[in-house]
Image: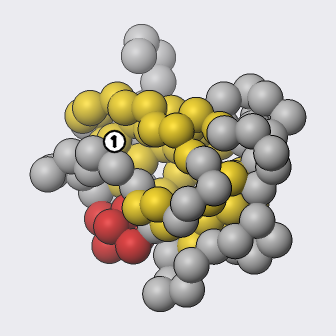
Amino acid sequence: MPGFTLARYDDTEQFQPLTFVTQTISTADVALASIHADARGAIISGDGSANAVRYRFDAGAPTASVGNRIEGTDTIIVWSRAALLAMHLIREDAADVVISVQFFK
């Protein structure tokens, strides 16, 4: 993206964009799909709807009422490969949510 720079907080190393994917989150607890082999981080956005997603990075499974929450209009940044691999998601509301994921190295 022209004019867009994403840098780590502790230095000026620039992240390079990798693949962009979308993933539908439904009633089943799912892992983040299609993680690029070189990914060290990701920007994850909701689909702009009124529906939310719950996620966790620990060994526990998210439920419709347990876990961190991404509103349909929210965006989060995940800064580590370990967190990307550990991330599990589930929809909170009645309708599926499509998340957009931009991986970075």
Establish if 33 lies above or below 59. above
Closest to the observer, 100 or 1 = 100
Residue placed under numbered mark 1 in the picture: 103
Establish if 17 lies above or below 76. above
User: Does residue 10 appear in the picture of this structure?
Assistant: no
88 with respect to 56 (left or right):
left
Percent of width and height locating residue 74: 73, 41
**Amino acid at circle 1:** Phe
58 with respect to 71 (left or right):
left
Establish if 86 lies above or below 52. below
Residue at 75%, 76% (x, y): give it.
66
The residue most toward the top is 2
Establish if 47 lies above or below 34. above
Closest to the observer, 49 or 18 = 49
43 with respect to 76 (left or right):
left
Residue at 63%, 73% (x, y): give it.
62
Residue at 57%, 46% (x, y): give it.
25
86 with respect to 56 (left or right):
left
| Quadrant of residue 64 within the rendered picture | bottom right
Q: Say how the picture is coloured.
A: secondary structure
Percent of width and height locating residue 67: 70, 73
Percent of width and height locating residue 46: 65, 37
Element assignment for label 1: strand
User: Does residue 101 appear in the picture of this structure?
Assistant: yes
Percent of width and height locating residue 58: 50, 84
- Label 1 neighbour load within 10 Å: few <14, some 14-19, many 20+: many
Residue at 42%, 12% (x, y): give it.
2
The residue most toward the left is 37
